[in-house]
Amino acid sequence: MSKRIESKSCQANTNGKKCDKDPIANCFHCSYNLCLKHLTEHTQLVESQSQTFFESNGTILNDFSKKLSTLSISPRVLELPFLQLEKWRHDAHEKLDELAEQKRQEIHIKIAEYRAILTKQVSEQKHQLDKLKRYLNDLSRQTNLATKDMKSFENQLNETRQFLTNVEKHSIQLSTEGFSVHIQTHYFETNISQPIQRTDSIRSARSEKKESPVSNGLKRRFIKKRSLSVCLL
């Protein structure tokens, strides 16, 4: 630990007081030149610190060794992720049920709206057919049937035929993507010969206002295009 040296005085400093004795050795631990008294005290201190160091770290090593011998996979690895997954599944099912019920109510509303529209349109078509029947009777009593009268009658009759054809194409369809549900309605267009094209866009607040029927005989048509979107996640 030490070696003999020649120096002017001991380098020990106790509470700010320097030692004036001659040093007898140099400590390899701290490189101080110390007298016999301070060398002895310093040696005891170093040995005490070393012993504490070895005992403390030996205890830690033994403790770590025991823990490693009994180490097992934490419940945070084996159980927690499954608990979190189950909670997510339960919550997702609840949200999905809420969304399904919401969409079910919206579909009922759309069916009621469509029924009202269809009833009105059918009533207009019946009224027009009555007019066409009277018109046909009038034509049958004419001696000379003009081509233009025949053409006019056929054109009006074709409008009703087109109406019946388009009604068969009317539908309410759902478009589902993940947890999103879009409802598309395919009802009446202003031009009865042109079925409504499918749309997935969400209408603005302005375009959500209820449209009014266009008054013009058989050409009264109800514009009905909506697409509602609700995203679960």
Image (tube, rainbow, N blue to C red):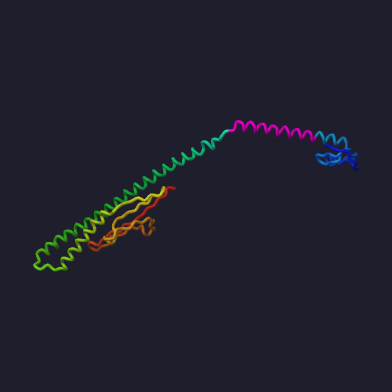
The residue drawn where x is 70% and y is 32% is 58
Q: Position of residue 84 (x, y in %)?
A: 49, 40
Q: Position of residue 149 (x, y in %)?
A: 15, 67
In the depicted structure, whether residue 142 falls above or below residue 19:
below
Judged left or right of residue 186, residue 136 is left
- Residue closer to the observer: 190 or 28: 28
**How many numbered circles does the render carry?**
0
Q: Is residue 58 magenta?
A: yes
Q: Position of residue 156 (x, y in %)?
A: 20, 62
Judged left or right of residue 79, residue 7 is right
Q: Quadrant of residue 194?
A: bottom left
- Residue closer to the observer: 141 or 158: 158
Quadrant the N terminus occupies: top right
Q: What secondary structure predominates along the stretch shown in magenta?
A: helix
Q: Quadrant of residue 97?
A: top left
Q: What residue range appears in magenta?
A: 45-71
Q: Position of residue 79 (x, y in %)?
A: 51, 36
In the depicted structure, whether residue 216 falls above or below residue 180:
below
Judged left or right of residue 75, residue 219 is left
Q: Is residue 125 magenta?
A: no
